[in-house]
Amino acid sequence: MPPTSQEAGPVNLLRPLLLMAYSGYYIIPTIIESILAFNFKPFKSFDDFKSAWFARFWVWFGPRSTENAGQSVMPLLRNSAQGVCLDIGPGSGEWLYMFAQANNKDITKIYGVEPNPGMHKKLRENAVKAGLGDVYEIVGCGAEDLATKGGVEKGSIDTIITVQCLCSIPTPEKIIRDLYPYLKPGGRWLVYEHVRTKYQSDFVGYWQKAVNLAWPTFFNGCDITRPTDEWLLQAGDWEEVSLRAGKGEGKYDTVPHVMGTLTKRK
């Protein structure tokens, strides 16, 4: 899966620093908003604060991230999801308009697996806005608890969707293996994810590791050095695999992607 043609130059290496600055800006508004609302839960632990901070930041940044990546993600998601879907880590639902039944008439049910309760209100609003209010069910647990807390049966899912979420899920390799059995035979996994750069011997390989020392704090646990594409390939028996690098991404991309589909063997 070689990366596609390079479009950005060396200055693109600084982009992660700009994105972390955007995130950091929302620390102070999160503190002020929590105090004014007499909501002191975010101050009980750093993890609670990061969840509140990221939720507030992502409401602003999510739509802009979607717009930036839309040209890559739209062909992947539109007219591709069908039947019963498992939407892993949908955040505030910035991609849901692509699942609108006008574009995906064969969708019958979507389970939105989002453990951050700070995202649920906006996620529900976006589901209704996309005309999915009657088929979209928010499951407020992690992917690792789907069977015990989410009530989702293995072998019942036609389409799994992971868009920029496997980078922040705990124990991702295990969860990817655990999600595979939820797919029906012939079911499809649609993926658009951050991955470890393929240019490990170039400067960007070392730069990505350095950036990743701070990145997870500013992006709610997101790890940009995971070989997610390799873990997906190893998750189970695939009948068809169609994965590629993000459009125009090359050796100056610190936060590269893998995108495409994997089809479970019948």
Image (cartoon, grey):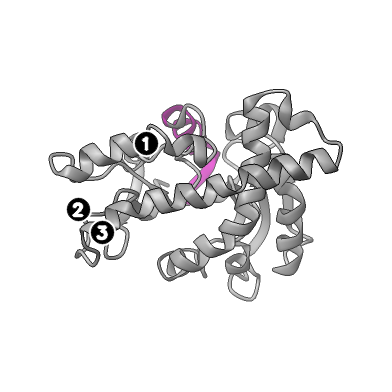
The image shows residue 249 at horizontal and vertical percentages of: 27, 59
* Residue pictured at 72% horizontal, 43% vertical: 118
The percent coordinates of residue 238 (x first, y second) are 35, 44
Mark 1–mark 3 contact, CB under 8 Å?
Answer: no
Mark closest to the chain's N terminus, 2 or 1: 1
Tag count:
3
Q: Position of residue 257 (x, y in %)?
A: 35, 52
Quarter where residue 44 is shown: top right
Q: Is residue 114 left or right of residue 71?
A: right
The answer to which quarter of the image holds residue 149 is top right
Looking at the image, residue 80 lies above or below residue 109: below
> Residue at (36%, 55%) from the top-left corner?
15
Mark 3 residue type: Val
Q: Is residue 126 left or right of residue 266?
A: right
Q: Which SS does the magenta portion mostly show?
A: helix
Image: magenta residue range: 173-188
Tell me if residue 139 can be seen. Answer: no
Per the image, the residue denoted by label 3 is 11
The residue indicated by pointer 1 is: 212
Q: Give the residue displayed 30% in from the left and 64% down from the top.
A: 247
Marker disc for residue 251: 2
Secondary structure under tag 3 reads helix
Q: Secondary structure at mark 1?
A: loop
49 and 259: which one is in front?
A: 49
Q: Earlier in the sequence, mark 1 or mark 3?
A: 3
**Can residue 200 be seen at all in this image of the molecule?**
yes
Nearest the camera: 1 or 22? 22
